[in-house]
Image (cartoon, grey):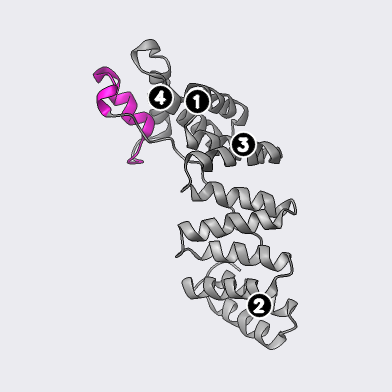
């Protein structure tokens, strides 16, 4: 069976207070720190965040929390994980309702093998933002890899509810179902994944592996041939 598909991207904390809450002299730093257009360099983004962090009482804690969170995201992208975690800790202390900070800190915990802490932070993220698909995906994968299959399936089901037109949700749930011995339910999910993404060879590989597990060798061979005929990863 193919591995579960991890949502690996860090998330920017870009939800701002009203722009009027940012003093005029800090608006360029605020714009740079959020970098919502993705046109600025990492150095410019970092400089904007650091300006806000150093602003003292001139900016409020919600703005500073976002600055710490985004600085932490940048540090994590450059693999300074300990510093990134410190920044995210600071962000959460300033604003305990900042979902992206919990999500990014969870990824750092997971990278360090601290899966229980990662689950706790992913759970905080989805409690604050029930539409944060990436947090459900990553929490589900931790559950699946730790043998908590029912919890993984529940999270993958939530992912499908939020993104019904994304094949990986069905594929991930199908893999979890297959691991738990629910082969017919897994087959239904793999069929749906292929219907959503008929040109993705990995979806045919998933179903081929399941067919082989079910003793359906001819069907497995047919799907393997389809996977080989399509471009992309296998």
Q: CA distance from mark 2 to mark 3?
A: 34 Å
Front-lying residue, 35 or 122: 122
The boundaries of the magenta stretch are: 19-38
Q: Is residue 229 visible?
A: yes
Q: CA distance from mark 1 to mark 2?
A: 46 Å
Q: CA distance from mark 4 to mark 1?
A: 9 Å
Compared with 56, 151 (above or below) is below
Q: Earlier in the sequence, mark 2 or mark 3?
A: 3
Q: Is residue 20 magenta?
A: yes
Return the x and y of residue 14 as percentages of the image width and height.
39, 36
Q: CA distance from mark 1 to mark 3?
A: 15 Å
Q: Residues within 10 Å of mark 2 (few under 14, many from 20)?
A: many
Return the x and y of residue 65 as percentages of the image width and height.
45, 25
Q: Earlier in the sequence, mark 4 or mark 1?
A: 4
Residue at image position (51%, 33%) is 101
Residue under label 4: 62
| Secondary element type, mark 1 | helix
Q: Earlier in the sequence, mark 1 or mark 2?
A: 1
Residue at image position (30%, 20%) is 26
> Residue 108: which numbered mark, if any?
3
Residue under label 2: 208
Q: Quadrant of the N terminus?
A: bottom right
CB contact under 8 Å: marks 2 and 3: no
> Residue 91: which numbered mark, if any?
1
Q: Earlier in the sequence, mark 4 or mark 2?
A: 4
Q: Earlier in the sequence, mark 3 or mark 4?
A: 4
| Secondary element type, mark 4 | helix
């Amino acid at each position: 069976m193919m591995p579960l598909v991890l949502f690996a991207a860090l998330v920017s904390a870009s939800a701002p207070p009203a722009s009027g809450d940012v003093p005029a002299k800090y608006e360029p730093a605020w714009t740079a720190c959020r970098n919502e257009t993705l046109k600025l360099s990492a150095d410019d983004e970092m400089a904007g965040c650091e300006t806000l962090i150093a602003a003292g009482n001139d900016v409020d804690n919600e703005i500073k929390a976002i600055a710490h969170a985004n600085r932490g995201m940048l540090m994590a992208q450059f693999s300074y994980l300990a510093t990134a975690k410190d920044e995210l800790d600071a962000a959460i202390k300033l604003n305990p309702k900042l979902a992206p900070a919990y999500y990014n800190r969870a990824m750092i915990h997971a990278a360090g093998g601290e899966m229980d802490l990662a689950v706790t932070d992913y759970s905080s993220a989805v409690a604050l933002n029930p539409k944060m698909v990436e947090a459900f995906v990553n929490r589900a994968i931790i559950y699946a890899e730790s043998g908590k299959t029912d919890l993984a399936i529940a999270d993958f089901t939530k992912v499908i509810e939020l993104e019904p037109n994304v094949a990986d949700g069905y594929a991930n749930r199908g893999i979890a179902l297959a691991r738990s011995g629910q082969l017919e339910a897994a087959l239904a999910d793999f069929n749906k994944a292929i219907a959503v993404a008929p040109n993705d060879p990995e979806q045919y590989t998933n179903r081929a592996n399941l067919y082989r597990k079910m003793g359906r060798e001819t069907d497995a061979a047919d799907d393997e041939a389809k996977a080989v005929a399509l471009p992309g990863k296998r």
